[in-house]
Image: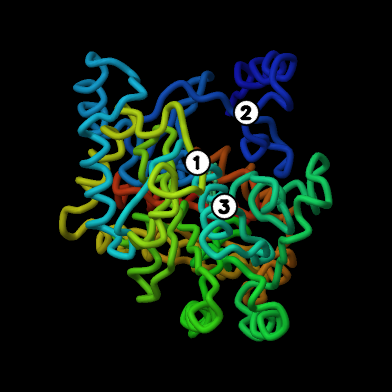
Amino acid sequence: MNFSKSHSLFEEASQFIPGGVNSPVRSGKAVGTKPIFVTSGKGCYITDVDGNKYIDYVCSWGPLILGHANEKVIDALKETLPQGTSFGIPTPLEIEMAKKITEMIPSIEKVRMVNSGTEAVMSAIRLARGYTGRAKIVKFDGCYHGHGDCLLVEAGSGVATLAIPGSPGVPENLVKDTISLPYNNLEAVKNLVKNQGNEIACIILEPVAGNMGVVPPVDGYLEGLREICSDNGILLIFDEVMTGFRVSKGGAQELYGVYPDITCLGKVIGGGMPVGAYGGSKEIMSSIAPEGNVYQAGTLSGNPLAMSAGLAQLELLSEPGIYEKLEEKSAYLEKGIMDAARKSGVEVYGNRVGSMGSVFFTGEQVKDFETAKKADTEKYAKFFRAMLEEGVYLAPSQFEAYFVSTAHEEKDLDKTIEAARKAFKKL
Ligand SMILES: *Cc1c(COP(=O)(O)O)cnc(C)c1O
C-alpha cells in the first residue's frame, strides 16, 4: 500500500499543527506509523488521499454508529443548513432533542446540551460539587473523562497510550481533590468512603470502560457503587460519552439496570457533529443556571446543525432490532478474530460489550488498568500495521476500542477476519 501523499501531508501538517494532529490519539506514534489523511467515508469504508480504501473500526472514535455519511443524517443537515448555522437564541430543535434524550434515557428528566464530551463531564462535576457542597471527586484508573484539569489523573485514552502519568500544566492544587482508585474494585471504594464519605461530591466512571481498551464492569460492581453513593449522599455519575446509545438504546445504565444521578453523553448523540450533553433528575438539574446558581454556558450549545444530525441518528437508532443486529455482527467479528488468533498461536484476550470491544495482546484476563497495561503494545503495533496493509483501519493504540456500525456487512466482517488471520501469522 502506498501512503506517500498522506506522509507528505503529515510533514506539512506538523509544521503548523502540534504533532500534525488536532487530537493526540490520531497520531500513529504508538503504533510506529504516521497518520493517514482521509478524503471521504461511506458506510463502513473510508478512503485516504492516496486512494487506499479501508474498512473503518474507529468510526470517528464512536459517534458513527450508522457508518459514514448516513443518508438520513446528511438529509437532516441539508434541510437545516439553509436556515442558518447558529443563532444563540432558542430553536425548536433543542426541545426535540431534549425530549428524545429523556425518552431514550429515563434517568434523565432534564438535559443541558454542550459541545463535547469533555465539556459534558466538566459541567457534571461542577454540578455535583455545587449540588452537594462537597469538593472531593472519585474516579478510576484508566477511565478517561475528557481533558478537563481535575480528571487528568491516571487517565485512559491518549494519556494511557502516550504513558503520561499526569499532565504538565495541571497544577497539583487543581487535582488535590481528585482521588483515583482501581476500576472494578469495590473494596477500594468502601475503604475510602469509610473515612471520607461525607467529603465526596461524586463518584464518576465509565460504566463500561472503553479508554483503557474495553473493560466491562464485573458482576455487582455498578450495583455496589450505586448503593455506596446512595448511602453516603454521594452523586453517582455515569460518563456514557462512549457507551450512550452504543451498548444499548438507553446506554450502559439500561443494559445493567443501574441508574446514576447524572449522565454524561457525547459521541453518538451528535451524529458526527461536535455535541455533548449532561442530564439527571429535575431536582439535581435545577441547580444549573439560570434555574439555579451553578454556572455553565455555551455560545454554540444546542446548535441547530448539531441537533438535526444528532436527532436524525437517534431516531434511526430508536427503530426496533438495531441493537440486536449490532450485537450479532459484533459477536460474529469477535469470534472470527479470536479463532484466528488461537489458530495462529497468538495469545489474546477479548473484551466486548455490544458493538464496542478490544483485543488485548495478553493471555491474562483484562479487568482493570493494571491488567490492561500488561498487554504487549509492540505486538499490537505490528498487528495494527499489518491490518492497515490489508485495508482495515483500527485505532492506532492498544488502549482504545473497535466500533462496529450498522453499515458493517457480513462480507466486510469476513474480510476483516481474513485480514486478521494473515496479520496474526506475521506476528
Ligand atoms: C471521548 C470521551 C470523552 C471526551 O469526549 P470529547 O468529545 O473528546 O471531549 C469523555 N468521556 C468518555 C468516556 C469518552 O469516551
Give whichever of discs 1 and 2 has the lower sequence position.
2
Where 420 falls versus 224 (above or below)?
above
**Front disc: 2 or 3:** 3
Q: Is residue 34 left or right of residue 91?
A: right
Q: Is residue 304 left or right of residue 279?
A: left
Read off the residue under disc 1: 296
Tell me the quarter of the image containing the N terminus: top right
Mark 1 secondary-structure assignment? loop
Where 373 falls versus 14 (above or below)?
below
- Toward which corner of the image does residue 203 lie, by quadrant? bottom right
Read off the residue under disc 3: 126
Q: In the rendered structure, are the residues bearing label 1 and label 3 in contact, judged by CB atoms less than 8 Å apart?
A: yes
Residue at 73% over, 61% down: 177
Instruction: Say what amino acid the circle numbered 3 marks.
Output: Arg
Crowd class of label 3 (few under 14; some 14 to 19; many from 20; radius 10 Å):
some
Mark 3 secondary-structure assignment? helix
Q: Of the numbered discs in the image, which one, if any, rests on residue 22?
A: 2
Residue 385 rendering spot, x and y as whole percentages: 64, 42
Q: In the rendered structure, are the residues bearing label 2 and label 3 in contact, judged by CB atoms less than 8 Å apart?
A: no
- Toward which corner of the image does residue 82 lie, by quadrant? top left
Residue at 27% over, 60% down: 323
